[in-house]
Amino acid sequence: LQGRAGEQALAVVKAWRTALPHSVEAHRFLVQLLVALKRSTEAVEPLRGLIALTPPGERAGVIQGLPRFLGRTVDERQPAAELVEKVLQGWLDNPATRVAAQVALGRAWLAAGDAARAAALAAQAHGVDKAAEAPAVLAIETLPGQAQAEAIVLSHLNVRPQSH
């Protein structure tokens, strides 16, 4: 890649991933390379694979980092949010990742300027886990203008009064 041979680097990383399909590093390098080559839309399947291969205890962190990561790589915010939505298909329905996925998607839509959609996703995530802090933080970020945001924060504080 540094030698300006992006296509050759991509071929090598794809061969690596084919040879070691369970390698987190191979998936990570492929995603990073696709993003560096401004081919983020091709990263959906490798990102899904990366999430699946990530140990369960670290998976929520990877999911929550998607909006920032992809938001910097796609020129327009709405396509970035749509890309995050494609990557998170399936993870939004998984009980172990639902809250993280809903919050990540909410952050992507908030960055795209859709505060109402972000607030709705915060409400959904809060409904799943009222003690989770991330939905309440997302709700705060939608203020002012989203009536349900304050109710989410107050409900969260009723469950966890010491929450930061």
Image: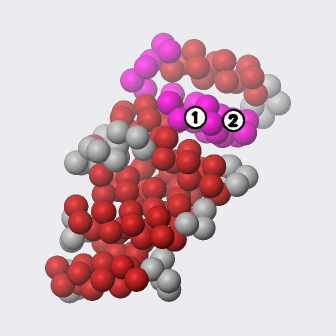
On whether residue 154 falls in the magenta region, the answer is no
Q: Is residue 43 visible?
A: yes
Q: Is residue 54 left or right of residue 82?
A: left
Numbered range of the magenta stretch: 18-45
- The numbered dot on residue 97 is none
Secondary structure, mark 1, is: helix
Nearer to me, 26 or 86: 86
- The numbered dot on residue 39 is 2
On whether residue 21 falls in the magenta region, the answer is yes
Q: Main secondary structure of the magenta part?
A: helix
Q: Residues within 10 Å of mark 2 (few under 14, many from 20)?
A: some
Q: Residue at x 45, y 80 (%)?
A: 146
Q: Amino acid at mark 2?
A: Arg
Whether residue 162 is situated above or below residue 101 in the rendered picture: below
Asked whether the beta carbons under mark 1 and mark 2 sit within 8 Å of each other, the answer is yes
In the rendered image, which residue does mark 1 sit on? 43
Instruction: Say which quarter of the image contains residue 148.
Output: bottom left
Q: Amino acid at mark 1?
A: Ala
Q: CA distance from mark 1 to mark 2?
A: 7 Å
